[in-house]
Image (cartoon, helix red, strand yellow):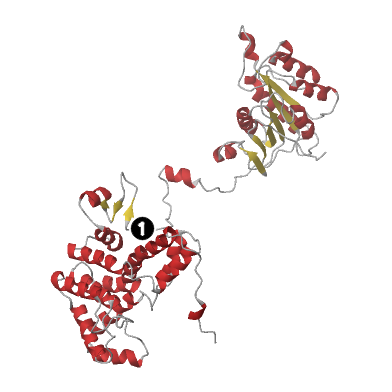
Amino acid sequence: KHNKIIIGPATVGGIQAGAFKIGDTAGTLDNIIACKLYRPGSVGFVSKSGGMSNEAYNILARNTDGLYEGIAIGGDVFPGSTLSDHAIRFSTIPQVKMIVVLGEIGGEDEYSLVESLKEGKIKKPVVAWVSGTCAKLFTSEVQFGHAGAKSGGDRESAQAKNTALKAAGAIVPDSFESLASTIRHTYNELVSSGVIAPAEDFDPPFIPEDIGKAKKEGKVRIPTSIVSTISDDRGEEPAYGGVSISKVVEGGMGVGDVISLLWFKRSLPRYGTQFLEMCLMICADHGPNVSGAHNTIVCSRAGKDIVSCLTSGLLCIGPRFGGAVDDAARYFSAALDQKKDPDAFVEEMKKKGIRVPGIGHRVKSKDNPDKRVELLISYAHKNFPATKYLDYALRVEDYTLSKSSNLILNVDGAIGALFVDLLHGCGMFSEAEIADIIDVGYVNALFVLARSIGFLGHALDQKRLKQPLYRHPGDDVLFA
């Protein structure tokens, strides 16, 4: 009805040489090349066995000009199509000049081929062999692999089928061992009579070796898509910056040490890792009113997941919120390295219309100092070998306080200046590496990591309190 033929269900598939294949038939790429399946020959082949099909393709390649089309119908008791279905179809394909059929013991499918030959439905030479002749050597009934390969009597035996095929006009060899020579003899006769013009052979197009196989055999090295220098999980346990996780845990290392290994690929001195941890604690949260926390709370009350809530808060981080840490490190270090007087630096920034990053606070002032900044300064003076960048930032503060009492050194400025002091003072980084660290955004990354703790806390707090959807109060909006 639909002009379609079903093969299987228990089939490895089929192939039209030089065109396409379906299923796993024909085996590996090497086998396809060895059997000359990269170009069409003159033989149509059909078999019940998928494994024997691959063997037959090799036999055809060595004894004829090769396969045109090969089908393995499968060894089911009730296959979707029969040997005769495909043999009849081959007889209508002009490119197929001879047909090879490989049957097997059991069932009566081969007899439909016998009838087709007798009725003249197949007019092309058919070389046929039915495997399983050895079954006669067994005293009891034997199952040969396939569901249908079981002789139910003399009529279903391989000998009876071979005899019937030969009587119907098929070319049947005396044994499987002589199948190849029988195929070659039939093919040569067709060539001599002009029925077959042997297909021109040629070298197959270059086919790159399977990369997975070549890699496994150590023949190639695949260019990597990602380069990672901070961690490695290929051994018995993960390693951070070359230090095993066992040593990290059992050696009493803290979060600051992990940051040191993963961010800087080296172990900073203890005062440095404690400073990093101190920054995380100090910057973890600054109440619910700041923009990042507010966004996180609104998002959480909208019923969003934790990742979305965290992202909502993190997206607020920038030049006006948290991002000043990077700029404070960049501007303070550049000004001091260029030997600019603090007052000249401030006035220069003013002329450019740039706020001095790390200076100024909306709530804190000279008379109401930020305790967090005091803690950072105290720790640095006690533990850092040198604090020249912090000292410069404090001199800038002295000048800005002469302008306004709230232009104090804030947390961003203190951390930014001290971060540069740490990089210079520990003696573990070159000037180029320090410049790169500041430019890449390491300092701001520290703020992002710290504030994530608080954002997550706010998100979880709102969910725990089961707070409803937030709507901003109307009396807090000026409708202009």
Residue on which the image places disc 1? 228
Residue 11, above or below 286: above
Nearest to the observer: residue 343 or residue 51: 343
Which residue type carries mark 1?
Answer: Ser
Q: Position of residue 118 (x, y in %)?
A: 84, 22
The tally of labels here is 1
Q: Is residue 97 left or right of residue 338?
A: right
Q: Is residue 406 left or right of residue 290?
A: left
Quadrant assignment, res 392: bottom left
Nearest to the observer: residue 437 or residue 55: 437
Give the structural element (helix, strand or loop) at label 1: loop
Quadrant assignment, res 50: top right
Q: Position of residue 381 (x, y in %)?
A: 15, 74
Q: Residue at x 47, y 45 (%)?
A: 212
Q: Residue at x 29, y 82 (%)?
A: 359
Residue 194 shows in the view: no
Q: Is residue 54 left or right of residue 323?
A: right
Q: Residue at x 33, y 74 (%)?
A: 439
Q: Residues within 10 Å of mark 1 (few under 14, many from 20)?
A: few
